[in-house]
Image: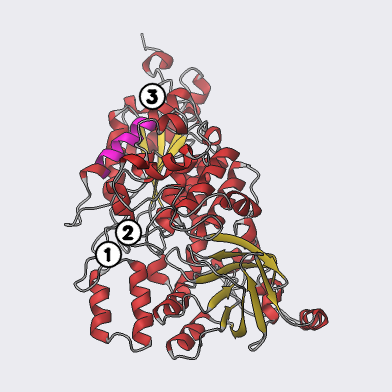
Amino acid sequence: MVEPVSKRFRLSKLKTRSQILTGDPDEVSHWVKRTGARAHLRAAGFEDEDFKKPIVTVACPYSNALPCNNKFRLLGDLIVQEIEKRGGKAFLCETPVVSDGQTMGFSGMRYSLISRDWIADCVEIMHEAYAADAVLSLGACDKTVPGVVMPLARLNAIGLFLYGGTILPGHCEGYDKGLDGGSIKEAIGKFGRGMIDIEELHRVERCALPGSGSCGGMFTANTMSSVMAALGIALPETASAPAVDRENKVTSIKEEHCKLVVEALFNLMETKITARDILTRKAFENAIAVVYAVGGSTNSVLHLLALAQEAEVELEIDDFNRIGERVPLIANLSPHGKYHVADLHEIGGISIVLKELLDNGLLHGDCLTVTGRTMAENLARTPSLSRLSQDIVLPISTPLAPAGHHINIIRGNLAPGSAVLKLSGKQFDKPFAGPAVVFDDENEAFKAVMNGKIKHGDALVIRYVGPKGSPGMPEMLSPGAALVGAGMAKTVPLITDGRFSGASHGIMIGHVTPEAQDGGPIAVVRSGDTIEIDFKAKTMSLLIPEEELKARLASWKPKERRLRGLLAKYAKLVASADRGATTY
């Protein structure tokens, strides 16, 4: 007598969805219908026992072209092995990856922010097409972090995030602190001003990035890994560990992280805790608080707004001011400080920052996390700063900079929607006022800085580089770092409808909305116009008569351009920067 299918194939209780793909043995008609799918899976290596197991999508944005993610094939394989050991089947989902550091300053950079939403869509496609039961998302290079977490929120999936790890700081004789990606751009600025020669520039190039991992300062990738820990969608101990050792080999710590996240994933599957159980309004407030405490990247504004939309959490750009005005800058990390995230890991990682915020009433301790415990429970054994002898994280009572001196959301007749000002702890006693020097092209602006055409007291404006205008909203790190390298970090603001790298520091004003391509006032600024920035009032104004501004706007016409393929599609779909530059 033939044994019934329902007895031969008793499904794991964790296989709550994927029987849609592999067949439900309790319904003979459905089991028969899915025969073709099982035949194809057998051809890919499945055996009878595998059809009983839950399927896990492993989001793995891998490329051998960049140091941030070039160890992901190894990490992905380790995760697959751990999932198999625990009785699951892993489906790898590899996606495109674009490095900001590599594409900075040329047309390839237009694809960086675009890749965030493309990655999210890739993971959704793979997860939904195969009706998987859970997701484990790997991310490192900065757009891959929100990119692989957005689909968890979008689909309310069971899952969590693992950071690939930070790069170690570069060592170079004659430099009193470690080097990083920002050091390279600033060295370019110094070379342009004759402050170093070509050999010294080449020496920095060779020393700054010693191996695999994401940019070593509190730039966008490390900001977003910290954000994921603060949101509770990642294990806190995984947020700041180096990707590799000094021999460029994946560390035993990172290998252990692969085991820990799989264990946590199976616990989430047992308890049926989903992404939206974790990604609540309070969790987003915790994430914003951490961005301000560590001096994080302005890209976090874009990514948190996008993630909140996916999670259907009400979050507006003004929430950053509301939360940030209470949180001082306490992490002494590059680009504004002397240490790197690998140094932060040595004293306990991002949990040290979370604990200090919690102890001072700046963090919601009752938020659920992927451990199945609350944030406060996770931090119960984390030592307080008073027990540590170090100057990497400072107490709230004696911060690196008081609250209100990092990221500010500003407005005015030059940015009636909003703009994002990054001060990185800098303090100004009086408003800035100076003549605009306007460029419609980043490369021309960069040449002007390098050739000494930008003077102390100027206001450098770069426009038509917004989400629609470029399209793709590239980062303006090259001209910004050139300003810093030329000694103009405190005297020349850079104003743009584009965005900035987390490595940027100075007086950086990005995300200007409406952008130039939408006919925002930034489109009609002329070189020589006076721009005023009132840091205390959080305003940015074009000092021309109101009637003159109206007349200029009335005569403005959008730039004609011919876009094809993905760029054309993106320009039609993308929302403004103050809405996270999302595509639906």
Q: In the image, what residue occupies the spot 32% across and 39% down?
A: 387
Q: CA distance from mark 3 to mark 1?
A: 51 Å
In the image, the segment drawn in magenta is 254-264
Give the secondary structure at mark 1: loop
User: Which secondary structure is most common in the magenta stretch?
Assistant: helix
Say which of 70 and 27 sits in front. 70
Residue type at tag 2: Tyr
Q: Which residue is mark 2?
A: 339
Which of label 3 and label 1 is nearer to you? 1
Q: Quadrant of the N terminus?
A: top left
- Indicate whether 384 appears above or below 427: above
On residue 92, the disc is none
Tell me which numbered mark, 1 or 2, is placed earlier along the sequence: 1
Give the secondary structure at mark 3: helix
Tell me which numbered mark, 3 or 1, is placed earlier along the sequence: 3
Residue 494 image position (x, y, % from top left): 54, 76
Residue type at tag 1: Gly
Which image quadrant is residue 182 in? bottom left
Q: Which residue is mark 1?
A: 178
Q: CA distance from mark 2 to mark 3?
A: 49 Å
Say which of 408 and 114 sits in front. 408
* Label 1: few (<14), some (14–19) or many (≥20) C-alpha neighbours in 10 Å: many
